[in-house]
Image (spheres, rainbow, N blue to C red):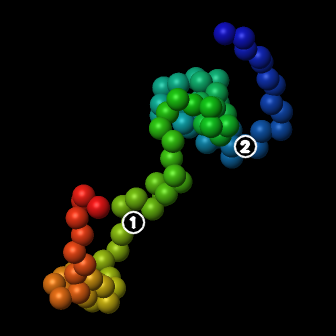
Amino acid sequence: MNTRQYTIRGVPKKLDDALRSECASSGRSLNSVLLGKLIDACNLGDGPKTNGLEQFAGTWIADPDFDAAIKEFDTIHPDEMIEWSSDS
């Protein structure tokens, strides 16, 4: 593998603290954590792609007014159905 070395200066303390905390919790080296983050940031990883919506997962809040507003969509009206065939 053809690799390069970088030196990064001027790392803010908050960033350093966050990176080192991740190293400690994951049991990985600083180099490994940084490489992983750079690879992810450049979309070069083999991992699953994300749609960016994971921040919303599990955040649903029940809303009775919304449920009432869409209740009509649960009703099937046979007289308004369109006949279709999978053969057409």
Residue at the left extreme, as displayed? 78
Which of the marked residues, 2 or 1, is nearer the chain's N terminus?
2
Question: At label 1, which amino acid type do we have?
Answer: Thr
Position above or below: 12 against 69: above
- Of circles 2 and 1, which is in front? 1
Picture coordinates of residue 54, whole percent (x, y): 46, 54
Of the numbered discs in the image, which one, if any, rests on residue 13?
Answer: 2
Q: Residue at x 22, y 64 (%)?
A: 85
Secondary element at image label 2: helix
Residue 77 seen anywhere in this rendered image of the structure: yes
Label 2 neighbour load within 10 Å: few <14, some 14-19, many 20+: few
Label 1 neighbour load within 10 Å: few <14, some 14-19, many 20+: few
Q: Residue at x 68, y 43 (%)?
A: 15
CB of mark 2 within 8 Å of CB of mark 1?
no
| Quadrant the C terminus occupies | bottom left
Residue at the front extreme, as displayed? 88
Question: At label 2, which amino acid type do we have?
Answer: Lys
Secondary element at image label 1: loop
Q: Residue at x 22, y 75 (%)?
A: 83
Q: Residue at label 1?
A: 59
Residue 50 vs residue 14: left or right?
left
Residue 37 seen anywhere in this rendered image of the structure: no
Position above or below: 8 against 52: above
Picture coordinates of residue 44, whole percent (x, y): 62, 32
**Which of 62/25 is in front?**
62
| Quadrant the N terminus occupies | top right
